[in-house]
Image (spheres, coloured by chain):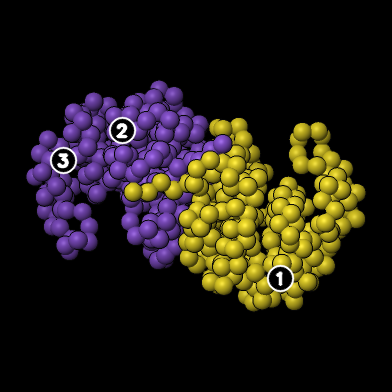
Chain colours: A purple, B yellow
């Protein structure tokens, strides 16, 4: 499948690398490819590698503008920061989004007031719904946003059965995402289809708790699970 | 321990009944005890029994005004609806709350706009913090709000290890709550002390997801768990 991954951060890198390794034709989209490639690594140990260093190890993944990445894509993954997602999708352009599945894995966490972080969209709306309203002909599915990106692409790295939630209004689009989740290693029983896209509010709203647990454990190698009678 | 349970609904009934069975001296607080006792049961199968019927089976639990229930209490459990909790605590009066542990299990779910429900306090504040600000000399601990009340008092009814979160600014108050959780059957490893009371925002914010899962499963006999590497 031709997949556009929007966003060059660690989430975009991790998803793009894994999907390319699974045989998909992946293009990462960014605002300005030259600027992305010119960016140097942050201080050692403080973040993901510079994109250029990452791409040197993942040469099968192309880099393009948001427009160039999405024009041929069959599936688009929004892995940009939640605060800039609408801007990134606007740069891709409605013509490149219409009719396509947009898998939205982003969160609108705002750390500008320190900890605890808040969400810039919350409660009576969600980022996923904002994207759907902005591009009514696209088929938005929210999923994977409730975990660290290493867990997204390697669910077996966390023992036991844990959950990935799926929200969306288009059943065929949700089936496409479920198939992709299956390729990433998610067993069918771990995939929780919550219903309509409005349920994305709930999955976006568990990020503050995710952060509290991450701080307590000292890392993101965990996931939410549902225990049931 | 002398415990006041504020709220005569199913959460208050369930907690009061179980804590009395454990040997605590429990008084349920309500705005108007006569009105509470006069209330008849809802349509069969549509809700908990009328309080009078419940009390007939739990005669060791007393009913009093918010004031009367809290005056002698060592620990106060807020099991009122989140939208009326501050009003209930005001009726109890600051003098009856000061210095005491207030275990807040309430949620501010607002169903007035249908489904999905929203929270009336969210994101940059929480009900628990509102209570703490209103009664700075009380020692507020948020816990147990992320599950069905049957699971609160009988964690073993859901198989496997699942989580109960604890948030609060007073370590001794959190230790008192942890001891109570232990009496209810929660193993130490299931008790997640998330830190300061501001982390109550995150645990209150998972209620919309809890509701989506409850609707999917058709009941509340489940709980969140943390799977980790």
Q: Name the element at disc 3.
A: strand
Q: Which residue is mark 1?
A: B74
- Tell me which residue sits at (32%, 39%) in the image: A155
Q: Is residue B17 left or right of residue A156?
A: right
Q: Quadrant of residue A229?
A: top right
Q: Residue at x 42, y 65 (%)?
A: A115
Q: Is residue A155 left or right of residue B178?
A: left
The correct choice, above or below, for B79 with respect to B137 in the image is above
**Tag 2 subunit:** A
**SS for callout 2:** loop
> Gap in Å between the C-alphas at discs 3 and 2?
26 Å
Q: Provide residue B217's location: percent of width, then percent of height.
A: 56, 32
- Give the vertical position of B135 relative to A23 (above or below): below
The image quadrant where one finds the N terminus of chain B is bottom right
Q: Quadrant of residue A4?
A: top left
Q: Nearer the viewer, residue B86 or A95?
A: B86
Tell which subunit mark 3 falls on. A
Tag in front: 3 or 2: 2
Residue contact between numbered discs 3 and 2, judged by CB atoms under 8 Å: no
Say which of marks 1 and 3 sits in front: 1
Q: Secondary structure at mark 1?
A: loop
Residue B186 in view in this figure: yes
Compared with B40, B168 (above or below) is: below
User: How many other residues sit within 10 Å of disc 1, few (<14), some (14-19) or many (≥20)?
Assistant: some
* Residue in the picture at 42% in, 32% down: A191
Judged from this view, the residue extending furthest toward the top is A172
């Amino acid at each position: 499948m031709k997949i556009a991954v929007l966003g060059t951060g660690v989430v975009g890198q991790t998803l793009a690398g894994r999907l390319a390794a699974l045989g998909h034709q992946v293009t990462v989209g960014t605002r300005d490819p030259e600027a992305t490639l010119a960016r140097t690594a942050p201080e050692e140990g403080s973040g993901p590698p510079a994109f250029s260093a990452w791409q040197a190890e993942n040469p099968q993944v192309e880099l393009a503008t948001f427009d160039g990445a999405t024009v041929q894509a069959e599936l688009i993954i929004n892995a940009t920061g939640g605060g800039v997602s609408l801007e990134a999708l606007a740069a891709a352009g409605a013509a490149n989004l219409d009719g396509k599945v947009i898998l939205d894995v982003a969160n609108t966490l705002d750390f500008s007031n320190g900890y605890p972080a808040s969400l810039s969209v919350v409660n009576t709306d969600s980022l996923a719904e904002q994207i759907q309203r902005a591009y009514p002909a696209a088929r938005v599915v929210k999923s994977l946003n409730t975990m660290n990106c290493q867990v997204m692409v390697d669910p077996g790295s966390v023992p036991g059965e844990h959950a990935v939630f799926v929200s969306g209004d288009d059943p065929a689009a949700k089936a496409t995402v479920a198939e992709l989740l299956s390729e990433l290693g998610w067993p069918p029983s771990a995939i929780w289809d919550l219903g309509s896209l409005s349920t994305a509010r709930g999955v976006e709203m568990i990020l503050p708790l995710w952060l509290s647990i991450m701080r307590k454990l000292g890392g993101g190698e965990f996931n939410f699970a549902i225990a049931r009678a």
